[in-house]
Image (tube, helix red, strand yellow):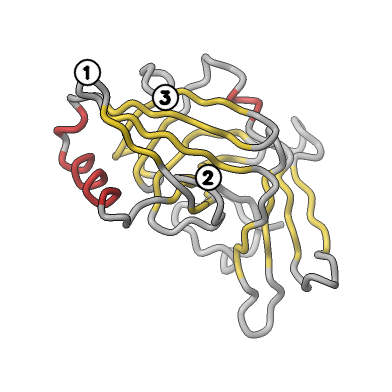
């Protein structure tokens, strides 16, 4: 699974039924620096193209989870449970998660809400996979950065399978509000992300 990150504004509201509602957005076409290249390598950046997650987002029967730190052991809401709404536009993927009163009594949920209230967890990271090439030929592309801006390799994700959104401490995409993302590649040292299923090719 690949993970993407972004820092932004996660909005928290209490509703009359005792539930806690969280809303946020993951902006498209915003480059994230995945690695600065170290002492000898080249920087690598990633861009998520508009509606790159449309395949699963546009299918209501496909469950998508809202998690703490990409851990399926720490769920907050899900589309299958009717507690996660996702909207997709050309500008951003936006969502609203409803944390039920029953869930607010769970210890890791209380810990998350306390950390968020203290301003320690404000990022969003999508967890996704790149579809196999036999299914989608040009799901991703890699290009050279404009020399006037730098020397990075920039990967653009055109189509990806979104499985979850996570709240994280340190996102890669500064404009994202409570966001996450994932990768594909063959150089394990490039992306030191736990439980990575893919990396750069």
Asked where in the image residue 99 lies, by quadrant, the reply is top left
Q: Tell us which disc is closer to us: 2 or 3.
A: 3
Of the pair 88 and 194, the residue shown nearer to us: 88
Name the residue: 41% across, 18% down: 80
Q: Residue furthest bottom?
A: 39
Cα distance between the residues tagged 1 and 2: 35 Å
Q: Tell us which disc is closer to us: 1 or 3.
A: 1
Q: Earlier in the sequence, mark 2 or mark 3?
A: 2
Residue 73, x across and y down, in percent = 30, 39
User: Which numbered tag is attached to residue 84?
Assistant: 3
Please name the residue that numbered disc 2 is placed on: 1
Of the pair 201 and 43, the residue shown nearer to us: 43
> Is 47 positioned to the left or the right of 77 in the image?
right
Asked where in the image residue 27 lies, by quadrant, the reply is top right
Cα distance between the residues tagged 1 and 3: 16 Å
> Of helix, strand and loop, which one carries label 1?
loop
Mark 2 residue crowding within 10 angstroms, few (<14) / some (14–19) / many (20+): many
> Is 179 positioned to the left or the right of 160 in the image?
left
Mark 1 residue crowding within 10 angstroms, few (<14) / some (14–19) / many (20+): few
User: Measured along the vertical axis of the image, is residue 200 above or below residue 166?
Assistant: below
> Of helix, strand and loop, which one carries label 2?
loop
Please name the residue that numbered disc 1 is placed on: 17
Mark 3 residue crowding within 10 angstroms, few (<14) / some (14–19) / many (20+): many
Residue 13, x across and y down, in percent = 31, 32
Q: Earlier in the sequence, mark 1 or mark 3?
A: 1
Cα distance between the residues tagged 2 and 3: 20 Å
Name the residue: 65% across, 59% down: 186
Residue 175, x across and y down, in percent = 56, 51
Name the residue: 59% across, 40% down: 129
Q: Tell us which disc is closer to us: 1 or 2.
A: 1
> Of helix, strand and loop, which one carries label 3?
strand
């Amino acid at each position: 699974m690949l993970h993407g990150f972004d820092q932004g504004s996660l909005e928290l509201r209490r509703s009359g039924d005792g539930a806690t509602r969280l809303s946020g957005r993951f902006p498209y076409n915003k480059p994230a620096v995945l690695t600065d290249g170290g002492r000898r390598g080249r920087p690598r950046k990633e861009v998520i193209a508009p509606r790159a997650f449309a395949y699963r987002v546009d299918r209501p029967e496909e469950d998508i989870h809202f998690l703490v730190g990409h851990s399926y052991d720490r769920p907050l809401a899900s589309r299958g449970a009717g507690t996660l709404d996702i909207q997709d536009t050309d500008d951003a993927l936006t969502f609203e998660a409803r944390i039920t009163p029953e869930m607010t009594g769970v210890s890791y949920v209380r810990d998350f809400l306390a950390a968020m209230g203290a301003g320690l967890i404000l990022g969003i990271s999508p967890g996704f996979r790149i579809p196999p090439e036999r299914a989608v030929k040009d799901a991703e592309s890699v290009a050279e950065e404009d020399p006037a801006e730098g020397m990075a390799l920039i990967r653009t994700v055109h189509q990806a399978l979104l499985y979850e959104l996570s709240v994280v401490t340190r996102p890669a995409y500064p404009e994202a509000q409570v966001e996450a993302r994932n990768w594909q590649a063959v150089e394990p040292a490039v992306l030191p992300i736990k439980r990575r299923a893919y990396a750069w090719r």
